[in-house]
């Protein structure tokens, strides 16, 4: 395991469960899971925190279970997933005119471009959660994915902006902070799930991530490496359970158990002569439930959810010919039997189940490979992406500062040497070149050694402070 890498913790606050997973990347770039805990969620409905006290208790229980799996863990900061029907998205365009047109386009220019988008006018009750660049434009050149290093006067980009209700976001923040944790970042759940179940080929081919959670179904559409669309559909596994409860006249716990054990997303696949016996209440006679009727209830609600998916795909013009990677189903609701067939029949697009083992190292428990933990694993990957970007920026800045310092130091040394020369010991031009070459090599080696030592010390101190 790479001991220099930080431990990142993902916290998934869902409608039916709250999960906390701690992980660290090994030397091969795979996630080693160091801790895992979960708890039943009571204070969340449709992805929104409605009871802060109950949510705090559930978060603390998940953390205690995570500590129980690894007593050596110390969790202070977390990456948290956010969903709910209050989530909205919009497309914007931003441009800046650079003052120094002779210099290359730098990360500072891109940061300014992104930060300007946080000034976008949105409803007063909403808050911007994330600003995601899609494609850059440099002067007359379009469809640029990485403009850093290019030359240009005007730099612009198309952005996908994700917003949410201020009060809903505030309730999540309060729940986490009162649990003794600090939120490192809020991440839209379908984006986190996408990071866990997708590979580079999926991003390029064009896929739609359909994350079927307990309270909502989250959608994220990617094409040619660009996030095209996000949406939150206000139906999920809880709605299916309630439909079964009301339609068959059973308790909610019984409805959930029947859905998981005997549920079919495609009624034609259910046997017409199969029945489930439910114990009667308070001495009443047992009740027999037809598996076929159960499947009809499940299919009706799942078809409604998939109709929303089709609606959103048509809204952005992503028909089945463009989604070469198909639909990736993930989340707890994706485990329904024959859901793939129903999805393909409803949407006309190929489908598969997305398991969060794309980036996991071997040796983890089997439960973590279930689709319901895709969001939590994706939150850890998001954290590592931030860490690696920050580290790269710090290293580049360190090299830039020290290179400038080294150049000034060498110039001063040369001037001092020239002042000590006399007519008798004035070296020839060849001797000067040989001396400068030796000095450059020695100075460069000394500089690189110092830089390596300082970078290691810098990140060791930073990680010690965090952990």
Image: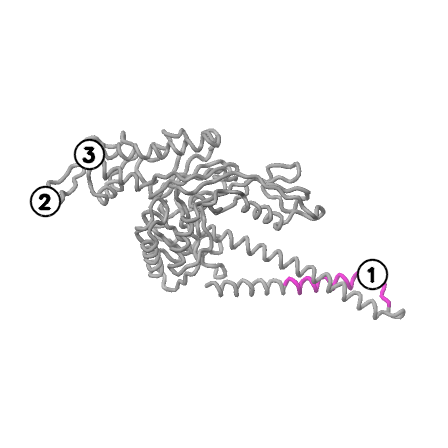
- Relative image position of residue 404 (x, y in whole percent): 70, 59
State the residue in front, 440 or 10: 10
Numbered label tally: 3
**185 in the magenta segment:** no
Q: Residue at x 20, y 40 (%)?
A: 250
Q: Is residue 267 above or below residue 419?
A: above
Q: Is residue 27 left or right of residue 275?
A: right
Q: Which residue is mark 2?
A: 283
- Distance from disc 3 to disc 1, alpha carbons, whole Å, reads 97 Å
Question: Which structural element holds mark 2?
Answer: loop
Tell me if 353 is positioned left or right of 148 in this view: left
The secondary structure that dominates the magenta segment is: helix
Q: Are marks 2 and 1 in contact (CB under 8 Å)?
A: no
* Comes first in the chain, label 3 or label 1: 3
Q: Quadrant of residue 35?
A: bottom left
**Residue that mark 1 sits on:** 430
Quarter location, residue 449: bottom right
Residue that protrudes farthest toward the right in the picture? 423
Q: Position of residue 227 (x, y in %)?
A: 50, 40
Between 163 and 107, the one nearer to me in the picture: 163
Report the quarter where the C terminus lies.
Answer: bottom left
Quick one: label 3 or label 2, which is nearer the N terminus? 2
Q: Which residues are magenta?
A: 426-448
């Amino acid at each position: 395991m790479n001991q220099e890498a930080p431990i990142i913790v993902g916290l998934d606050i869902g409608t039916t469960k709250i999960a906390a997973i701690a992980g660290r990347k090994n030397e091969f770039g795979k996630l080693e899971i160091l801790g895992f805990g979960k708890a039943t969620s009571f204070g969340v409905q449709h992805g929104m925190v409605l009871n802060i006290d109950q949510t705090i208790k559930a978060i603390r229980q998940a953390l205690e279970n995570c500590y129980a799996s690894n007593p050596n863990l110390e969790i202070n900061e977390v990456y948290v997933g956010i969903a709910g029907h209050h989530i909205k998205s919009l497309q914007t365009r931003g441009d800046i005119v650079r003052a120094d047109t002779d210099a290359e386009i730098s990360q500072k220019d891109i940061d300014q471009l992104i930060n300007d988008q946080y000034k976008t006018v949105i409803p007063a009750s909403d808050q911007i959660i994330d600003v995601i660049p899609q494609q850059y434009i440099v002067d007359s050149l379009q469809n640029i994915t990485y403009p850093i290093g290019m030359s240009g006067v005007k730099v612009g980009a198309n952005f996908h902006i994700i917003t949410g209700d201020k009060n809903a976001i505030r309730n999540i923040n309060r729940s986490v902070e009162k649990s003794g944790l600090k939120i490192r970042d809020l991440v839209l759940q379908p984006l986190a799930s996408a990071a866990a179940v997708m590979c580079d080929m999926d991003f390029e081919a064009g896929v739609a991530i359909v994350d079927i959670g307990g309270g909502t179904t989250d959608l994220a559409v990617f094409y040619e490496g660009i996030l095209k669309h996000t949406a939150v559909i206000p139906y999920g596994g809880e709605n299916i359970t309630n439909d079964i409860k009301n339609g068959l006249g059973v308790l909610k716990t019984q409805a959930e158990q029947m859905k998981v054990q005997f549920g079919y997303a495609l009624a034609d696949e259910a046997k017409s002569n199969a029945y489930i016996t439910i114990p009667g209440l308070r001495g009443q006679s047992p009740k027999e439930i037809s598996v076929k009727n159960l499947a009809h209830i499940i299919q009706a609600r799942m078809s409604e959810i998939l109709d929303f998916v089709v609606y959103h795909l048509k809204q952005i013009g992503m028909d089945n010919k463009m989604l070469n990677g198909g639909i990736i189903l993930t989340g707890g609701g994706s485990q329904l039997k024959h859901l793939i067939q129903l999805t393909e029949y409803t949407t006309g697009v190929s489908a598969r189940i997305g398991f969060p083992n794309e980036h996991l190292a071997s040796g983890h428990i089997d439960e973590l490979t279930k689709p319901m933990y895709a969001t939590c694993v994706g939150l850890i990957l998001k954290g590592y992406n931030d860490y690696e970007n920050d580290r790269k920026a710090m290293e580049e800045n360190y090299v830039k500062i020290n290179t400038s310092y080294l150049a000034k130091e060498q110039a001063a040394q040369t001037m001092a040497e020239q002042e000590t020369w006399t007519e008798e010991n004035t070296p020839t031009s060849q001797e000067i070149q040989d001396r400068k070459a030796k000095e450059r090599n020695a100075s460069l080696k000394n500089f690189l050694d110092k830089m390596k030592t300082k970078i290691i010390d810098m990140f060791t101190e930073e990680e010690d402070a965090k952990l």
